[in-house]
Image (cartoon, helix red, strand yellow):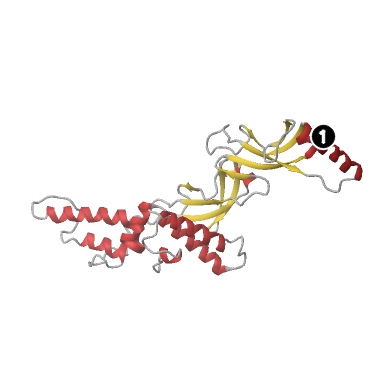
Amino acid sequence: MAYIDYYKILGLDKGASQDDVKKAYKKLARKYHPDLNPNDADAHRKFQEINEANEVLSDPEKRKKYDQYGENWKHADEFEAQQRQYRQYQGGQGNGGTYWSSSGDGSEFSDFFEQMFGGMGGGRSSRSSRGDYAFRGQDYTTELQVSLMDASKTHKQIITVNGKNLRITIPAGIADGQTIKLKGQGGPGVNGGPSGDLYITFSIPEDSRFKRVGDDLYITAPLNLYTAILGGEQIVETMDGKVKLNIKPGTQNNTKVRLKGKGFPVYKEEGKSGDLIVTYSIDIPTNLTDKQKELFREIQNLN
């Protein structure tokens, strides 16, 4: 596999902060998302590269390995483990210790590098064709768009990753930009190694009715002038149906009312939700009749 420069893919340099990585990823992911480029193979390929770059650079531990080992970062743990064993082997040669199962000339260690890094170990490759080493499969990343309403309830959905259909459960309360891991749903392992994992990043577009801030929801409710002045009742929409609110006489424009527990479900905390904050927007009547205008003038004179 050709070397891919993850920093270049996201348009960043190696000194970029984690916040820079997040911003660059979100901007590019939206631009090249398959839903916006349904028949563009280059955009689909670019989208996969962006997700792969973000999966590595957004994780401090993976990013550290990538910075040190480049394209071979996924095998960093095996590399370092073999390195430690080889040092033990080298130390054991002078005192008769047994630290490494080898023919005695270090060829096993060299072969490991030959197979893993294409000759970086500088040794022979007599074992490379035997495939004795087991490696973990590749991690997959994908982005899934769900509506605010769908994100408010636990539900199942079928997604396709690398040609494979997966039925997943999306927990209520998922947030825009949040990533969840499905263990073992990535690429298959090599030589009996474990499968990689699947990382799903959620994209939740803005809703036309509700604005979400954390677990709270905000909505603007129109209120006619007469109800605002005299009081009465107002029907307000929530995520789980409509509710009737009592309006106090003399309610002012932009008055806010907090409805406890009527907001967005809290992620993985069953039965717990944020609040719904309702802002009243008073509608000023237009196209008044002459009689109505006369009545308003009388009220004005009384004041």
Residue 198, relative to residue 271: is it above or below? below
In the rendered image, the quadrant that contains the C terminus is: top right
In the rendered image, the quadrant that contains the N terminus is: bottom left
What is the quadrant of residue 127 in the picture? bottom left
Q: Is residue 233 left or right of residue 208?
A: right
Residue that sits furthest to the left in the current view: 95
What is the quadrant of residue 71 in the picture? bottom left
Q: Amino acid at mark 1?
A: Leu
Query: Of 49 and 214, which appears nearest the observer?
Result: 214
Q: Position of residue 130 (x, y in %)?
A: 32, 62
Residue 266, relative to residue 144: is it above or below? above
Q: Is residue 46 left or right of residue 250?
A: left
Q: Position of residue 290 (x, y in %)?
A: 91, 45
Q: Residue at x 43, y 52 (%)?
A: 196
| Secondary structure of the residue carrying numbered label 1 | helix
Residue corresponding to mark 1: 302
Q: Residue at x 54, y 69 (%)?
A: 42
Q: Position of residue 225 (x, y in %)?
A: 78, 39
Instruction: Determine crowd level at label 1: few under 14, some 14-19, many 20+ residues with C-alpha closer than 10 A.
Output: few
